[in-house]
Amino acid sequence: MKQLSQLEFGSIVGERYRIVRTLGSGGMSRVFMAEDLKLPGKQWAVKESVAGPQVMMLVRTEAEMLISLSHPRLPRIVDFFEHPPSGAVYLVMDYIEGITLEAYMKGYQGYIPQEQIVPFALQVLDVLDYLHTRQPPVIYRDLKPTNIMLTPEMEFILIDFGIARSYKTELDQDTVKLGTVGFAAPEQYGAGQTDARSDLYSLGALLLYLCTGGKYSEWTAGVEGYIRGELPRHLIPVIRKLLRQHPEERFQSAGEVIRELRRSADFQPAQQGISVNDASMDYAGTRVVAVLGVSAGSGATHTAIAVSHYLARRSRSVALVELHSTAKAFARLQEVVEGTSVGQSSPSRRFEVDGVHYWRQTSRADVISLLGGSYRFIVLDLGSGQDNERLEEFLRADYPLVVGSGAEWRVQDIAGLARSLQRHPQHKWNYCLPFATSEAVRRLRKELDHDKVFALPFHSDPFERDDEVDQVLDELFRGVIPDTRKKRFGFLKRQR
């Protein structure tokens, strides 16, 4: 910083934010915790930058970029203003409670439990995939332990976009060479333009840092001897490929790395009651089925339950996740299963019905953690909400399933949803219409130019096997699971 900040405890900036303490400082900026005078009890992080016109432009660019982004692993920008007399600019954003990954590693002697490393990698990949698929793509360029906050819930959040940039196809190299030695890709210091593969190199450096207890972030001779012995062996070739010197030799996208991690049976700990051999037999990675209702009352939860128990009868190891925090369906079901009083909330959000693990009111971070578990299928009950978080989970699922009303006057709701999301690829979408006529299905298939439109027959008990429903689901999941049969289930009958 060209001049020292004049802010101290009690200073007020923007006529609204009172400085409480310093959170950190860097070469061009300083970050403070501040309390909101208009919202008592609310705390924010205020980033102050004081420098010349070029740095001011960088800060404005950072603000514009962050304001345009929306992801749970990125800070939310709430205010941006300048103070011309002092030459300072201020960026007000969410205050993230927690410590940096670097501080955590130092405080815990470089130890992160081995079962958390892959879920952590998936969390970072989730946000990288989001950034890299923007138009234009956003390249983070500074993935390192000091730029990652670890919350009390053990979630990763990226906190500094000081040198991030949008990828420009017309350029053959970066204007400014920036990055942190040991974590930045080689191309950030030489000729060439950084792209998504540069961030993937940094991910590899970060994973190596975690796997060696903070000792190494570059693949050098003898580094294998410092990799913790209890870690999944399959992780090593993934890290090595991420750390290739030439971008074309690395994974080419965050999605490709995600698929590789999901595919590996080595990452899946044995499920209680199932041997390691059984859990990994015929394993091809965790597959995600996302069920989204076109509107309230369309039957999304009923269909998600039916699909989950169908999959459990075919392949075992199924989780059904209620991915909306205000839903009450799973809570009521848990009361019935566990025999508790109405309204008495169980401390455990997981319960089991006929081999299906139900997870009520689950967060997106929990879903990422479940992907590192032993489940063959994860079924997401998204309800009828289309907020950013649920919509993104629907779009990234292996089997997105839209549920709409089969009533003649409501069939067009599905076509309307498809049109509203036409900017997204829809080739792998599936559509289910409870109680629809064959004529309604035929018309919708023609309008959508899509074969995966199915009518679901009346099915009063989604926990119980129904031959007609199974025939529809056999067609829906043809080629995905083996055609095996398990005993019939009668959940509702047992409750009577």
Image (cartoon, helix red, strand yellow):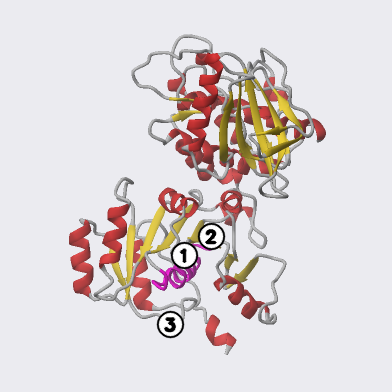
Q: Looking at the image, which residue is at 58% across and 66% down?
A: 358
Give percent across and percent down for residue 295.
39, 67
Label of residue 460 in the image: 3
Element type at mark 1: loop
Q: Looking at the image, which residue is at 31% across and 53% down?
A: 420
Q: Nearer the viewer, mark 1 or mark 3?
A: 1
Residue where numbered disc 1 is placed: 383
How many C-alpha atoms fall within 10 Å of the one at disc 3: few (<14), some, or many (≥20)? Answer: few
- Residue 316 lies in magenta, yes or no? yes
Element type at mark 2: loop
Q: Is residue 383 left or right of residue 44?
A: left
- Amino acid type for the residue under numbered disc 1: Gly
How many C-alpha atoms fall within 10 Å of the one at disc 1: few (<14), some, or many (≥20)? Answer: many
User: Alpha carbon of mark 1 to alpha carbon of mark 3: how far?
Assistant: 19 Å
- Amino acid type for the residue under numbered disc 3: Ser
Q: Magenta span covers which residues? A: 296-318
Q: Furthest residue to the top?
A: 190
Element type at mark 3: loop
Q: Earlier in the sequence, mark 1 or mark 3?
A: 1
Q: Is residue 420 left or right of residue 102?
A: left
Give percent across and percent down for residue 19.
74, 35
Q: Is residue 451 left or right of residue 271?
A: left
Label of residue 323 in the image: 2
Main SS, magenta region, reads helix
Vertical order, 221 against 350 (above or below): above
Give percent across and percent down for residue 13.
67, 33
User: Alpha carbon of mark 1 to alpha carbon of mark 2: how far?
Assistant: 8 Å
Does the image show residue 24?
Answer: yes
Mark 1–mark 2 CB contact (< 8 Å): yes
Q: Quadrant of the N terminus?
A: top right
Vertical order, 394 against 108 (above or below): below
